[in-house]
Image (tube, helix red, strand yellow):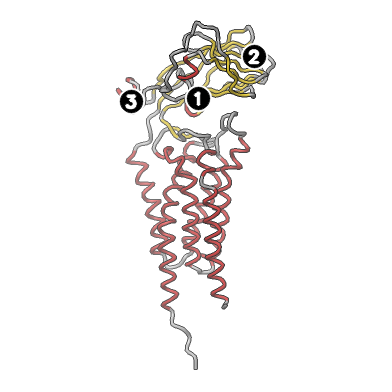
């Protein structure tokens, strides 16, 4: 086998291997980057105060107000009443206990409170406690912290959708031992970025990447796009927000999100080296692999492209820019990489064989 054939076989083997590894990575970023739920929203909820302060108790608002989380690392039990004041939750050293006779037990299982309430639920009956966790942490859909009507904006927002609004100021009562506790926060709405501004940018990213693969005279511009893909992929993984304590640690979420990013780095490294050496076919094939991996990362978070708020530990603009590269450039690399592989393969075939005499 000649050296050229060996290089071709090695390139094809690399594509197959990376494709198999990418298949194994499909599920990781979809659940790990944001811990489930939406990555973008025009609504946002913020915690203002816990009164009195409770050292050892952490209260967090998750996913724009979709969930409220309590972690109680003290030796004293913390209780949360239901919407009618009935016993609902006990969070303490022996884990989390939930009252099966509280309507909140069923209403809080779903973001919009659509879980049917059993007929035997009784808010005045003695609590029927069921243990739901052995850890002193719990997250639930508390319907005071978010907007409940699906597909419909609050009236004040609908009346002036081009302005930011305070939708509600909410409180959630709790008790720590014998001390009454009030958790207070605010729910806001912000207008999304204007479509006339953002969509042309996304389309230009897509069209420019496709053009690099189909029209560039050498594979080197494709190598430059692969470098941009690596930067966006790594940033997106490292900016993974802190997940619910009941799901994962922040470090664990970042490690999980880094899996496809490191695969992007590997494939882009192979493709970039091939592009510098003028091996357009291998560069194009690696661009297809990188593009597919970018889509695996970006599509679960695609809603940040047209919403006002994004779940991220970094600046909102950078989070939106990273996802734009993952999705638009990712799709462009798949299309443009196929074009480059075909074009440079045809160019190689068109070169006449040296005369033998």
Q: Nearer the viewer, residue 40 or 299?
A: 299
**Residue 203 on image: x %, y %:** 36, 49
Q: Residue at x 60, y 34 (%)?
A: 248
Q: Report if the CB atoms under discs 2 and 3 are less than 8 Å apart.
A: no
Q: If you read the primary sequence from the N terminus, does the residue marked by circle 2 or circle 3 appear first?
A: 2
Q: Tag 1: Cα neighbours inside 10 Å, few (<14), some, or many (≥20)?
A: many
Q: Distance between the residues labelled 1 and 3?
A: 20 Å
Q: Mark 1 points at which residue?
A: 67
Q: If you read the primary sequence from the N terminus, does the residue marked by circle 1 or circle 2 appear first?
A: 1
**Residue 284 on image: x %, y %:** 47, 63
Say which element carries label 1: strand
Q: For residue 77, which numbered disc appears in the image? A: 2
Q: Which residue is drawn at 57% across and 77% down?
A: 1
Q: Tag 3: Cα neighbours inside 10 Å, few (<14), some, or many (≥20)?
A: few
Q: How far apart are marks 1 and 2 (CA)?
A: 21 Å
Relative to 134, does residue 269 appear above or below in the rendering?
A: below
Q: Mark 3 points at which residue?
A: 152
Q: For residue 89, which numbered disc appears in the image? A: none
Q: Distance between the residues labelled 2 and 3?
A: 38 Å
Occupied quadrant, residue 55: top right
Q: Tag 2: Cα neighbours inside 10 Å, few (<14), some, or many (≥20)?
A: many
**Residue 69 on image: x %, y %:** 56, 23
Mark whose residue sits in front, 2 or 3: 2
**Residue 340 on image: x %, y %:** 43, 64
């Amino acid at each position: 086998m000649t050296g050229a054939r060996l290089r071709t076989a090695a390139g094809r083997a690399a594509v197959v291997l990376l494709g198999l590894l990418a298949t194994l990575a499909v599920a990781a970023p979809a659940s790990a980057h944001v811990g489930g739920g939406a990555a973008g929203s025009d609504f946002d909820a913020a915690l203002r105060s816990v009164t009195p302060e409770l050292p050892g108790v952490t209260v967090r608002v998750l996913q724009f107000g979709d969930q409220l989380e309590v972690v109680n690392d003290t030796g004293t039990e913390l209780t949360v009443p239901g919407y009618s004041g009935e016993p609902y939750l006990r969070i303490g050293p022996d884990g989390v206990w939930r009252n099966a006779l509280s309507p909140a037990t069923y209403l809080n299982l779903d973001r919009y409170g659509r879980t049917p309430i059993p007929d035997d639920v009784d808010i005045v009956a003695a609590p029927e406690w069921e243990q739901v966790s052995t850890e002193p942490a719990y997250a639930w859909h508390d319907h005071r912290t978010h907007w409940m009507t699906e597909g419909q904006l609050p009236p004040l927002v609908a009346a002036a959708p081009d302005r930011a609004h305070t939708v509600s100021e909410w409180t959630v009562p709790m008790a720590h031992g014998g001390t009454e506790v009030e958790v207070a926060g605010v729910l806001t709405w912000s207008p999304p970025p204007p479509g006339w501004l953002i969509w042309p940018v996304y389309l230009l990213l897509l069209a420019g990447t496709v053009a690099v693969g189909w029209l560039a005279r050498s594979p080197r511009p494709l190598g430059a796009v692969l470098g941009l893909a690596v930067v966006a992929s790594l940033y997106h993984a490292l900016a993974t927000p802190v997940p619910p304590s009941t799901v994962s640690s922040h470090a664990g979420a970042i490690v999980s999100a880094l899996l496809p990013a490191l695969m992007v780095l590997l494939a882009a490294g192979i493709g970039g080296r091939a592009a510098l050496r003028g091996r357009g076919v291998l560069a194009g094939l690696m661009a297809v692999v990188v593009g597919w991996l970018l889509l695996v990362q970006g599509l679960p978070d695609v809603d940040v492209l047209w919403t006002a708020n994004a779940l991220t530990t970094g600046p909102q603009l950078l989070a939106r820019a990273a996802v734009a590269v993952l999705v638009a450039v990712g799709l462009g690399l798949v299309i443009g990489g196929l074009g480059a592989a075909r074009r440079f393969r045809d160019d190689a075939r068109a070169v006449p064989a040296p005369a033998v005499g």
